[in-house]
Each structure stands twice: as structure tokens, then as C-alpha cells.
Image: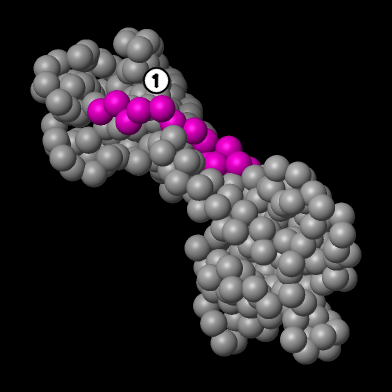
Amino acid sequence: MFKRQKSLASERKRGLLSQRATRFILKDDMRNFHFLSKLVLSAGPLKPTPAVKHSKTTHFEIEILDAQTRKQICILDKVTQSSTIHDVKQKFHKACPKWYPSRVGLQLECGGPFLKDCITIQSIASSSIVTLYATDLGQQVSWTTVFLAEYTGPLLIYLLFYLRIPCIYDGKESAGRLRHPVVHLACFCHCIHYIRYLLETLFVHKVSAGHTPLKNLITSCAFYWGFTSWIAYYINHPLYTPPSFGNRQITVSAINFLICEAGNHFINVMLSHPNHTGNNACFPSPNYNPFTWMFFLVSCPNYTYEIGSWISFTVMTQTLPGGLTA
């Protein structure tokens, strides 16, 4: 009996100890779960793992044929989609040194327009193989050279006529006749006009980096130099007749000439600089400069001022060639 009571007491103790242990374990688990919940909530929503994008560069194969014979010249491989026609010309020159980039014209088809250097291969490619036709454009010159030659020639040619060198005028007539003041003023105005041209070509105008055939240089120089010789011959001739209305005609025309020259310069400066948005294609608008107010009347005031300069020069000197130049 005593042993049975003792065993029952021991079993009760064990039961109490197991209950206490179970309660302690449950409380510990609840604390851990509560802590883990707080940690998950503080971390925020789970973000999906970003997918790794593998960049894939497309390469093209450029087949270049002779536009006249339609025979294959070379094949340029591994040309990227961002490459331009200018890049293709450079690679073509490395593969075939006799084809200079400035002399090469590339076409998509024979007889078609020449592709501009800024065009990308991706924009003209219909497949991974692009066929281009090459044409030798002949000897080329830069546009800067063209403009400088156009404007330097008239400046020097007019001075030769102004000095009345013996091979142009009779020496006895030149020595026996004094020059009218308008002859000196005309030389000054003519020099101002072409010096402005030269300075704007060098420092104002953004001349294209491209090239043009040599024949265009010859044609442009023939026009400018020819008209300058025609104008200078009559104005600086010993038998030159001064304007009919005298100093009033000369003064008014000279002032108007200088105003047009100044207006032309300010308009060219305005057209060469981008507006506040940085977009060159945006149409310019008048500002505080009075010379820009001509934009209210015409879209290209630089040509209006140019015509005004030559009309003023024609009235000032009273010569027909000056008017025809305008």
C-alpha cells in the first residue's frame, strides 16, 4: 500500500514536471514566432529577383560592289548595327586603300541617291547581309576650302583693279585723272563685305565636314571672281562717272550699306547658335537686337540684308554690274 502511494506520488510529480516543461517550450516557441513575425514585417514585401538580360549585339555583313561593273570589290564583316556610312567608308578604305572615304559614294542600288554619312546600317538593312554600290566621285575638296576660295578671290581681285595696275588700265589715263571719293568708299565697302564673309566662315558658320567635287569649287570661284572683275573694272576705270545726285546719293547709300552689313552679321550669328532649348532646328525668333526684328517680316533676313547691301552698293556707285550681282 505504501509503495503504491509512493509510486502514484512520483507519477504525479512527473506529470507536473512534464506539463511545466511543455508550457515553457510553448511559451518559448511563441516568443520566437512573435520575434520572427516582427522581423518579416519590418523587412517589407519580398522583391522578385530581377531577370538578368543578356545583351546581344547584331552584326552585319557588308558586300560592296562596283557601281559600274557590278563586280564585287570586298566584303566587310562584323559591322555593328550602330555603325554609320562614315564608319563603313573608313573600313572600306582599310580593306581597299585606293578607295578614299572622301571620294566614295555608296548607294543601295545603282542610280539611286548617295547615302549620307550619318545614316546607320540598321536603318537601311533588311537582312544580315547588306549590299552597297560604290562610286568614285572624283577629286573632292572640303566646304571650308570652297568658301575661303570664293571670298578671298574677290577681295584680292578688287584691290588689283583699285591699284590700277598697267596691265589693266592705260598708265597715262590713270596718272592724268584723279579718283572721285566714291571710288575709295566703294573699295572700302567691298573689302568690308568680303572680310565679313571670311571671318564668319572661320568663326561663325558651322561648315559641314563633308566634301564636294572639285568642279563645284571651280564653278563657284568663276561666278564670284568674274562678277568682281566686272564690277571693279568700271568703278576703278579712269573714265568712271560719279553718281548723278552727288554726295547725298553716296552718303545715304553708304549708310544703308553699313546697316545691311551689320544686320546680315547679327542674323548669321543668331542662326549659328542654338536657342535656349538646345535645338538648332527650332525656328529663331526676334530678340532685343533691332536687327533681328526683320524676322517679323521675312523668314530668312540674312538674304534680305544681303540684297539690301548690293542694292545700296549699286546706287552708291551707280554701276549696273553691282545690281546684277544682287
The front one of 299 and 40 is 299
User: From what the image shows, is residue 54 above or below residue 98?
Assistant: below
Residue at point 47%, 41% (across, down): 218
Residue furthest to the front in view is 172
Across and down, in percent, residue 118 comes to 39, 40
Looking at the image, can residue 70 be seen? yes
Query: In the rendered image, which residue does mark 1 sit on?
Result: 100
The front one of 189 and 244 is 244
User: From what the image shows, is residue 159 above or below residue 134?
Assistant: below
* The C terminus, quarter of image: bottom right
Across and down, in percent, residue 19 comes to 43, 34
Q: Quadrant of residue 212?
A: top left
The front one of 140 and 56 is 140
Residue 43 belongs to the span the image colors magenta: no
The front one of 185 and 56 is 185
Residue furthest to the left in view is 70
Residue at point 54%, 82% (across, down): 298
Across and down, in percent, residue 77 comes to 25, 15
Residues drawn in magenta: 135-149
